[in-house]
Image (tube, rainbow, N blue to C red):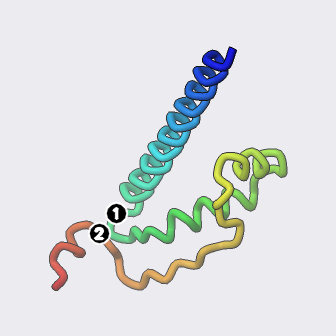
Amino acid sequence: MTDKLMTIEKRIQRLKERRNKLYTQQATLFYKDVEKIFKNGFCPALVLDILTKTYETASALQQQEWEKRAPSFHTKPVHSTCTHPQTTESTHHQG
């Protein structure tokens, strides 16, 4: 009986790790999509602003679901402090 419980616990842990990996992949894809859309006007804080606005306009049920999935999600807007476009190229040429 104990062995079965341990096996189930291990499966649960693996599934949680897999779920977290998928969430990370989704976030990365979203980040890359926003970067493609805004190109030279892209700022990483912009992604957080978009997510925050989306959260604020979501239904209470949807907000609860997101909070369960990502308890560290900021519910207050993160104001962008980017004044210059940031691209991969510009960061490599600085220095």
Q: Quadrant of the C terminus?
A: bottom left
The three-letter amino acid code for the residue at tag 2 is: Thr
In this orientation, which residue lies closer to the viewer: 29 or 85?
29
Name the residue at 35% across, 76% down: 85
Against 15, is 27 above or below?
below
Image position, residue 62 (x, y; %): 76, 46
Name the residue at 56% across, 28% down: 10
Contact (Cβ within 8 Å) of mark 2 with mark 1: yes
Q: Is residue 19 left or right of residue 82?
A: right
Image position, residue 93 (x, y; %): 15, 77
Residue marked by disc 2: 87
Residue marked by disc 1: 39
Name the residue at 66% across, 19% down: 2
Against 31, is 48 above or below?
below
In this orientation, which residue lies closer to the viewer: 36 or 12?
12
Q: Quadrant of the N terminus?
A: top right
Q: Is residue 64 left or right of residue 52?
A: right
